[in-house]
Image (tube, rainbow, N blue to C red):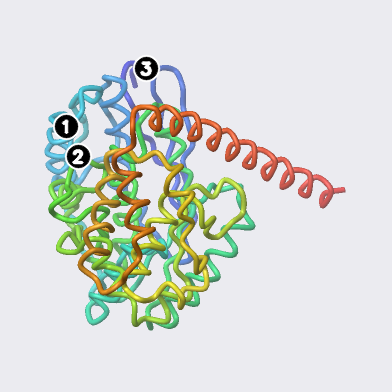
Amino acid sequence: MSSKSVTIALLPSEPSQARAEVSWGGKKLEVETSANISLAHGIEPWVYPAALVGMKRGMPVSTDEPVDSAVLTGVEKAQSLLDSWYGDMRAVEVHAELSTVAECPDGRGVGCFFSGGLDSFYSAIKHSDTITHVIFVHGFDIMLDNEKLFLETVTAMRRAAADLGKPLIEVRTNLRHLHFLNGVDWGRASHGAVLAHVGLLLSEHLHTVIVPSSYAESNQEPWGSHPDLDHLWASSAVRFEHDGVEATRPQKAAGIAQSPAALDNLHVCWTNYGTDYNCGKCEKCVRTMINLRVAGALDRCPSLPDEIPLDVIGRTRLDHGAKQFAQENLDALRASDIDDPALEEALEKAMNPSAVKQVELSIHTALRNAELVATALVAKSSRKVRQLVGRG
């Protein structure tokens, strides 16, 4: 196949493993996804993430494997939407023969992606009567080499799934690295296609997969997982439902406030460059603490501090999405019976910083990011040393 295209070739795989080689511009990467249950071995789960590489590189996508017609239709529509959103991604052709539609086994269920965060607990509890499985993926928020944090998190997810009465499907993938190498932004574009990859691999077990929403309907903007996008990633065997847009984050917090399974195991931090389950200091941790405070549940959530760090709110630079979440919290706080003028003032100032304050916040954010990266490097080096010592 041409080096001027993104090519996908399936590799031999074990029953609970799916492997493919993706090539582009003279480079290639072996991508692997594995799970604690059997996975589908067709080409379909690889088409969507490969298409994003093609969009970013301006290269058509090709494979010698025949592809489900529903996937070829879906990838065309998904690319068209992403193309309309982003100036750095252009729709490309996907060259493949059509496959015949394979019969799916009877008795398949409904899955829900389950990171342990507010969005996923909300959807899992909301749809508890219909969901048959919850799905945890290692390689998304937690890096593959951060074994300590992974073990702590997956232990909590197993406990939460058991409390919810649902089997936990555990998945591990290095697919995010493919998009990193090709400059495909994880938040803006990548993660929805990678979620679809996982969902399609589970077609032997699931006919529908729920994708918990990141934003409420009133705050929707172009994003890698979106109500206009997620359903386009379907195949003839699996469909996706974007769920939860009817609720803001404060409303979702209220929705899980009476669930010990959620409060005991809540995991929201994604700046965990070290090994903290929740750092309690990043924008997302603090935002969730405020969500729970308004819902009257913060003191019952052992994975987050009881006290909201007002000084951190004042030092946090809010991007557009974070400002939306801060406004949700401010509105919910004002509508509640909670009398906390200091918290209200901190949120107001964070959302409307002065020009001087904006410069200070930029400097603080840069220093904080440098600190987090240094922590990550130290943690990674320590893990490597322990591995070497263990080998010795």
Cα–Cα span, label 2 and label 1: 6 Å
Q: Nearer the viewer, residue 4 or 158?
A: 158
- Closest to the observer: 148 or 331? 331
Q: Secondary structure at mark 1?
A: helix
Tag 2 and tag 1, C-beta contact below 8 Å? yes
- The answer to whether residue 376 is left or right of residue 154 is right
Q: Which residue is mark 3?
A: 3
| Foreground disc of the pair 2, 3 | 2
Q: Residue at x 29, y 40 (%)?
A: 352
Amino acid under disc 1 = Trp
Q: Which residue is mark 2?
A: 222
User: What is the C-alpha distance between the residues marked 1 and 3?
Assistant: 28 Å
For the N terminus, which image quadrant?
Answer: top left
At label 3, the amino acid type is Ser
- What residue is shown at x 30% (from left), y 25% (from top)? 56
In this rendered view, identify the residue nearer to me: 75 or 269.
269
